[in-house]
């Protein structure tokens, strides 16, 4: 191991930024690990029950706000950003306005970002190791219990907006975040300042009123939570508001003025796959489980499984304009093997004017 006192850490950080750019990252910053105010916010959020059935949020406790407990000896976080906006996709507004189509959150139209970014971050860490010798680190891409948005803010990558997403003045919010927790005392960047001002566009834009106050999100009402994380029946009172959103929701980002500065994805893995930018709902509902496995393997959508995918599409079909094609698609799965899917099909058929 090289003598760390002899390492030119500012130069190492400069080289790290260049290496990150070469690997497809669009920004990199470094932060210390102390985020006490964010820890207090997390405690209040959990106490309010806003995490719903994401029990892992409570199970990890305060470790999520204390990265040094997750990686003993860690001193800094290297936070990175990778833009994902799919410029070639059908315009989001057009898809949301057409109830015959299914809307998939723009981040999930391409390959699974977890794998793409993890590979790139591991390469970045290995390149750093070749430069300075062995060092302690852990790569995180939305899988380890860390408050990544708070750490990215302190690394200067952006501020947390009123919708609770990270915003950058030069890139909006259509980007992924990843981290390297490390024991290297790299020079930290200045935290980003907030620039939402008096704007509240994201709050009334939420279809299910999940943004209960600026910077306060009740996940139990959030369409992203309901269609991805929630394992059971979607509350009946929220189904109509879900509309045709079958995986995630982007409404709060679509209305954000800062997203006029968003960058198109440069990474080829974020290009649209399987025409998911504007899929016809009846056709999606006719997929078999085998077809789901074949087409969604390698996608972030694969994690929710065929049952939740079918549940979500059934809700969207219930909200779709009435048609024989929609009713036929629902009737074909009226006796689905899954009780969860059957319940949502029955609801959708009633909405379509047919008795289940």
Image: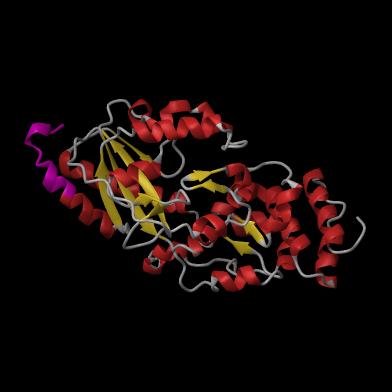
The image quarter in which residue 4 lies: top left
Q: Looking at the image, can residue 288 be seen?
A: no
Residue 2, magenta (yes or no): yes
Question: In the picture shown, does residue 112 fall above or below 170?
Answer: above
Up/down of 68 relative to 181, above or below: above
Which residue shows up at 53% across the image and 32% down it?
46
Residue with the most extreme front position = 198
Quadrant location of the C terminus in the rendered image: bottom right
Percent x, y for residue 118?
40, 47
- The N terminus: image quadrant: top left
Residue at the (8%, 32%) spot, across then down: 5
Question: Colour scheme of this structure image?
Answer: secondary structure
Count of labels shown? 0
Most distant residue in the right direction: 355
Relative horizontal placement of residue 86, taking residue 183 as reference (left or right): right
- Residue plotted at (81% across, 58% down): 348
Who is closer to the viewer here, 5 or 50? Answer: 50
Seen from the viewer's position, the closer of residues 80 and 170 is: 170
- Residue 339 percent across, percent down from the top left: 81, 44
Residue 74 is inside the magenta segment: no
Give the percent coordinates (x, y) of residue 12.
Answer: 15, 46
Asked whether residue 235 appears in the rendered view, the answer is yes
Residue at 13% across / 41% down in the picture?
9
Main SS of residues in magenta: helix
Q: Nearer the viewer, residue 69 or 134?
A: 69
Residues rendered magenta in the picture: 1-13
| Residue 75 locus on image (x, y percent) | 25, 32
């Amino acid at each position: 191991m090289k003598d760390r006192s002899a390492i030119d850490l500012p130069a190492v950080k400069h080289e790290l930024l260049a290496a990150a750019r070469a690997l497809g990252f669009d920004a990199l910053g470094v932060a210390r690990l102390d985020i006490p105010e964010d820890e207090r916010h997390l405690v209040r959020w959990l106490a309010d029950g806003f995490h719903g059935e994401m029990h892992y949020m409570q199970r990890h406790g305060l470790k999520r706000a204390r990265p040094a407990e997750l990686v003993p000896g860690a001193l800094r976080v290297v936070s990175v950003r990778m833009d994902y906006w799919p410029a070639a996709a059908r315009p989001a507004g057009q898809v949301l306005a057409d109830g015959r189509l299914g809307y998939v959150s723009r981040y999930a139209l391409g390959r699974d970002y977890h794998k793409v970014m993890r590979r790139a971050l591991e390469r970045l860490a290995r390149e750093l190791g070749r430069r300075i010798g062995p060092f302690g680190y852990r790569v995180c891409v939305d899988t380890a219990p860390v408050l990544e948005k708070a750490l990215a803010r302190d690394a200067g990558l952006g501020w947390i907006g009123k919708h609770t997403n990270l915003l950058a003045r030069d890139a909006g919010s259509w980007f992924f975040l990843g981290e390297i927790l490390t024991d290297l005392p790299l020079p930290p960047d200045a935290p980003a300042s907030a620039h939402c001002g008096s704007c509240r566009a994201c709050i009334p834009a939420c279809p299910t009123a999940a943004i209960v106050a600026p910077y306060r999100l009740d996940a139990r009402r959030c369409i992203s939570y309901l269609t991805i994380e929630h394992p059971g029946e979607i509350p009946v009172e929220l189904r109509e508001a879900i509309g045709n959103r079958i995986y995630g929701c982007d409404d709060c980002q679509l209305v954000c003025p800062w997203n006029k500065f968003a960058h198109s994805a440069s990474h080829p893995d974020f290009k649209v796959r399987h025409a998911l930018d504007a899929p016809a709902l009846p056709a999606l509902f006719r997929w078999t489980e085998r077809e789901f496995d074949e087409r969604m393997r390698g996608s972030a959508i694969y994690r929710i499984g065929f049952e939740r995918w079918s549940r979500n599409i059934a809700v969207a079909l219930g909200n779709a304009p009435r048609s024989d094609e929609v009713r036929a698609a629902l009737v074909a799965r009226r006796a689905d093997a899954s009780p969860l899917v059957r319940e949502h099909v029955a609801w959708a058929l009633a909405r379509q004017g047919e008795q289940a």
